[in-house]
Amino acid sequence: MACDSAWSDNSTLITRRNKIVRLKSGGLIGSAGDDDSRAVEALFDRVKTPAGLPTRKELLELVIDYVGIVVLPKGRIYHVAINEPSDHQTHWTGGLFEIGESFHAVGSGSVHAITAMECGKTARDAVHAAINRDMHCRAPVYTFVLAALDKPPAHKARRKK
């Protein structure tokens, strides 16, 4: 998973920082939208399988304008959206949607990133493409590799004396 480092409020660059968090489950969550996404991260922190995913009700109760990507430890990808009511609505909307492809992107540069990955580029290269084409995307690029949790940790064999 890769991300740029710009958090912006429409046309204003607020800060630059990493937008990807490694969850306690070993999965990853990448965020766009509200900068304080700790409540969303907490809902997904220990989720290892689809059975443990939060419900739509649990997501919407967070009342945070949010969009993100969750990758479970074995690689299943989910799009997470929580949307504040628009002018004609009175309730929050959104949910959790499994992605059928091996890649996905969210945020202002997502169209450029998805196109780059569709053309065979890595996630890192796709973020660089978004930085080149979207005024709200900025370097540096951060990358995280999904750790394989089903393998026991490698230990060096002790030498006998």
Image (cartoon, rainbow, N blue to C red):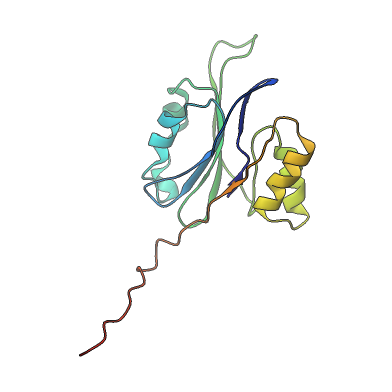
Left or right of 3, for residue 159: left
**Image quarter of the C terminus:** bottom left
Q: Position of residue 98 (x, y in %)?
A: 57, 45
Instruction: Tell me where residue 121 sits by quadrant.
Output: bottom right
Depth check: give the residue in front, 12 or 88. Answer: 12
Residue at 30%, 81% in the rendered image: 157
Q: Position of residue 130 (x, y in %)?
A: 73, 41
Which residue is most to the front? 161
Which residue is most to the left? 161
Q: Is 101 located above or below residue 42 in the figure?
A: below
**How many numbered marks are there?**
0
Q: Is 135 located above or below residue 77 in the figure?
A: above
Q: Position of residue 119 (x, y in %)?
A: 78, 55
Depth check: give the residue in front, 49 or 8. Answer: 8
Q: Position of residue 114 (x, y in %)?
A: 72, 45
Residue at 42%, 51% in the rendered image: 49
